[in-house]
């Protein structure tokens, strides 16, 4: 039962994030509000990168669930656990908490009112709110093996500095 629930959860979460990415890609030809996607396009936004990261993680988790045999020692399972514990969970929580904190302080800093015509409210919540319960569901559905703290912080630090430097 637990394996079936995990499979359904991972496939559903992957499908949800794939739908969001497809919806974002469909907006490519639409008229953009001034100032959005200048210098780097959507790739400069941590929110967009987080949606891709979540889709990658849940896709990897779904593939791992569908793999036959003992999974706890497989390279795929170790990569999935590393990706979740070092990137998907911390970055996802960071995006949600930072976005809504800044939004509560001054909306214009992170999500100007002009963007409401381009991104409907459901898409805003899909990228900035719904990530939180999906990640908490993952914590409840799937136990993870966590890497050593020094390796995790080093990897997260390198990726974080790379993002900030570009």
Image (cartoon, rainbow, N blue to C red):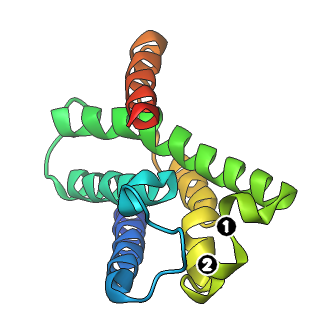
Q: Is residue 159 visible?
A: yes
Q: Nearer the viewer, residue 3 or 7?
A: 7
Task: Please name the residue shown 74% across and 65% down the image.
Answer: 108
Q: Nearer the viewer, residue 12 or 24?
A: 24
Residue 71 x/y as whole percent = 22, 40
From the viewer's perspective, tell me whether residue 57 is left or right of residue 156.
left
Residue 106 x/y as whole percent = 82, 59
Asked if the residues shown at circle 2 and circle 1 are in contact, with their CB atoms under 8 angstroms apart, the answer is: yes
Cα distance in 3D space between marks 2 and 1? 7 Å
Residue underneath mark 2: 115
Residue 55 x/y as whole percent = 35, 60
Q: Nearer the viewer, residue 51 or 114?
A: 114
Q: In terms of image quadrants, where is residue 62?
A: bottom left
| Quadrant (top left/top right/bottom left/bottom right) for the C terminus | top left
Task: Please name the residue shown 27% across and 32% down the image.
Answer: 78
Residue underneath mark 1: 111
State the residue lying farthest toward the front. 34
């Amino acid at each position: 039962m637990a394996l079936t629930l995990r499979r359904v959860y991972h496939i559903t979460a992957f499908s949800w994030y794939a739908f969001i990415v497809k919806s974002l890609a469909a907006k490519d030809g639409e008229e953009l509000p001034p100032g959005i996607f200048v210098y780097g396009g959507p790739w400069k936004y941590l929110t967009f990168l987080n949606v891709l990261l979540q889709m990658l993680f849940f896709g990897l988790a779904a593939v791992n669930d569908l793999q036959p045999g003992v999974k706890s020692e497989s390279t795929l399972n170790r990569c999935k656990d590393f990706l979740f514990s070092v990137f998907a969970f911390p970055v996802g929580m960071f995006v949600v908490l930072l976005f809504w904190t800044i939004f509560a302080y001054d909306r214009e800093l992170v999500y100007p009112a002009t963007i409401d015509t381009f991104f409907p409210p459901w898409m805003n919540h899909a990228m900035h709110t719904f990530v939180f319960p999906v990640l908490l569901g993952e914590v409840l559905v799937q136990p993870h093996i966590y890497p050593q703290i020094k390796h995790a912080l080093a990897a997260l630090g390198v990726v974080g500095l790379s993002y900030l430097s570009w």
